[in-house]
Image (spheres, helix red, strand yellow):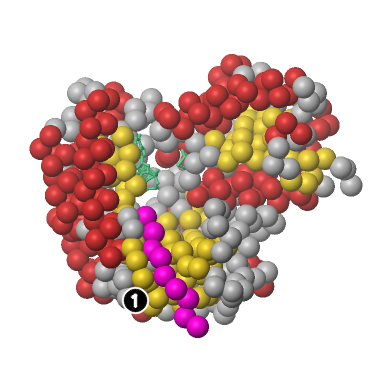
Amino acid sequence: MIDKKYTILNYGCQMNESDSEHFAGQLSDLGYSLTNDYHNADVVVVNTCCVRESAEKKILGKIGELKGVKTSHPGQIICVAGCMAQKGGDKLVKKYPQIDLLIGTAQVNNFKAILLDFLADKRQKVYDDVSIKETEFEGQCIRKSSFAAWIPIMYGCNNFCTYCIVPYVRGRERSRSKESIKKEIERAVADGFKEFTLLGQNVNSYGKDQGNRHSFAELLKECNDIPGVERIRYMTSHPRDMSEEVVKVVSECKNICENFHIPAQSGSNRILKAMNRGYTRDKYLELVDSIKKYCPEAAITTDIIVGFPGETEEDFQDTLSLMREVQFDAAYTFIYSKRSGTPAAGYEEQIPLDVKKERLNRLMEVQNENSLAKNKLLIGKKLEVLAEGPSQSNSEIWTGRTRTNKLVLWPVMGKEYTIGQSVNIEITSAQTWLLKGKAES
Ligand code: SAH
Ligand code: SF4
Ligand code: F3S
C-alpha cells in the first residue's frame, strides 16, 4: 500500500458530484486516502462545469492557483475532469501545462487505468473520447453522504436546447441497464443508505435509446419496491417528456417523493420556441395541472433563465405571470450566459447585462413571495423528515429534509438523533428558504 493522499475539488451539478464519488472510489482502490487540503495532496482532481461563464471563470482561477501549489509539492498529479475537460481538450492543457491528465466526461470509470498508466510513464495526456460504453459500471464509489445516494441512470442529452452546452460535453443519451441500477441500489441499501436520487440530464427519456417508451415509469416502480428503500428522488425531468403515467406512478408509490422539479426556463411561447424546448406555455401548465390533480401535496420547483437573446419586456412578463400562476415552491434562477458553440450564442439581440440583472431581481422577488406563501401553508402540519445532522452554527439544532425536499430545523431538546433517521416534525414557523418545527415526542 502506498501512503499517498488525494483531494477532489468538485464543481457543477449532481452528475458531477456522483462522478467525483466514482473518482474517490478508484483512488481509494489504489491506496490513496482523502485529504481536504489540496496543498498536501499527491493527486488533485478538479471536476469541472461549464454550464455558465461564471462557473468556468472560477474554475480557471483555481487551475491557475494550482500551478503554484504544484511548484511547492513536486510530483503532485493534477487531473482536470468533467465538462470543461471535455470541451477544452488540447487547448486547455496547452494553456495550463500544470495539468497532467485531462479526463473527459465518459472516462470517469477508466480513471484507475488512466492514473496507473500515468504513474508508469509520467506523460501529460488527454482522454476525451465520449463514445465509449460506461453504462454497465459496477465498481465501487465512496459516497459523501451516509444515507443519501446518487444513482446515475443515464448519461448524456439529446435535446440541444439552444442555450445549453451540456449535450456537447456529455454526448448522446445512453441508458444504464435496469439490472445494473437496481443492483447498485440494493448494495447501497445493504450499506445503510435510505434515500436514492436517480440521475440523468433528462430522466424521462430513460430507456428510449433502447426502444422502450415506458421505461422510466417502470424503473420508478421497480426501485420503489426494493426492500429497504425509504425515499426515491429523480432529476432532471424535461417537461416535454414527463408523461401523466409518471405523475400517476409518483402518486401511487409510497417511497417516491412528492417533489417535481420541472424546469420551465421561460413563460413566453416565443422564447420557448427559440430555446428549442419542445413545449408551449399551455402544455407546461397542463403538466402542472396533472401534478396538482394526482399529487396535491407535492412541491413543484423549476429552473428559469432570464435574458435569453431577444427576450423582450413582454416575454419577461410572461415568465413572471407563469411564476404567479404556478406558485412554485422554489425556483433556481439564472442569467442567460453565452456559451460558444451553442446556437443561441450566435443570435442577434443579446440582452445587456444590466437588463438581465434587473429582470433577475424582479423574478427573485416574485419567487421569494411564492416560496414564503407555500411554506406558510405547512405551519401546523406533521411532516416526515430525514435527519441530516446538527446545523453548522448550533449543535442544539438539527436539520433535515421533508419528502418534498424542504429544509427543516428543530431543537434537539435533550434527545439524541442519528444521521439518516426518520423524524416526525410538527411545523411551527416558516421562512422563505426553510421551515422550523418541533419533534414529536
Ligand atoms: N438537464 C438538466 C440540467 C441542465 S443545466 C435540465 O435540463 O434541466 C441546469 C440549468 O442551468 C438549466 O435548467 C438551465 O436553467 C440553466 N442553464 C443551462 N445553460 C445555461 C446558460 N447558457 N445560461 C444560463 N443558464 C443556463
Ligand atoms: Fe441542457 Fe436542455 Fe439537455 Fe437540459 S435538456 S441538459 S437544458 S440541452
Ligand atoms: Fe455543469 Fe456539466 Fe453538470 S456543464 S451542470 S457539470 S453536466
Residue 214, percent from left and from top = 37, 67
Q: Amino acid at mark 1?
A: Lys
Work out whether residue 297 or residue 358 is closer to the camera in this orientation and state it: 358
Residue 439, percent from left and from top = 47, 76
Q: Quadrant of ligand 2?
A: top left
Above or below, 62 relative to 436: above
Work out whether residue 233 or residue 320 is closer to the camera in this orientation and state it: 320
**The magenta stretch spans residue 399:** no
Q: In what element is the residue under mark 1?
A: loop
Horizontal side of residue 7 vs 117, given as left or right? left
Residue at position x 64%, y 56% in the image? 143
| Residue pointed to by mark 1 | 381
- Asked whether residue 429 is in view, the answer is yes
Work out whether residue 346 or residue 266 is closer to the camera in this orientation and state it: 266
Above or below, 373 relative to 48: below
Residue at position x 21%, y 40% in the image? 362
Read off the magenta span.
433-441
Residue at position x 54%, y 73% in the image? 413
- The picture quadrant where one finds residue 97 is top right
Above or below, 123 relative to 86: above
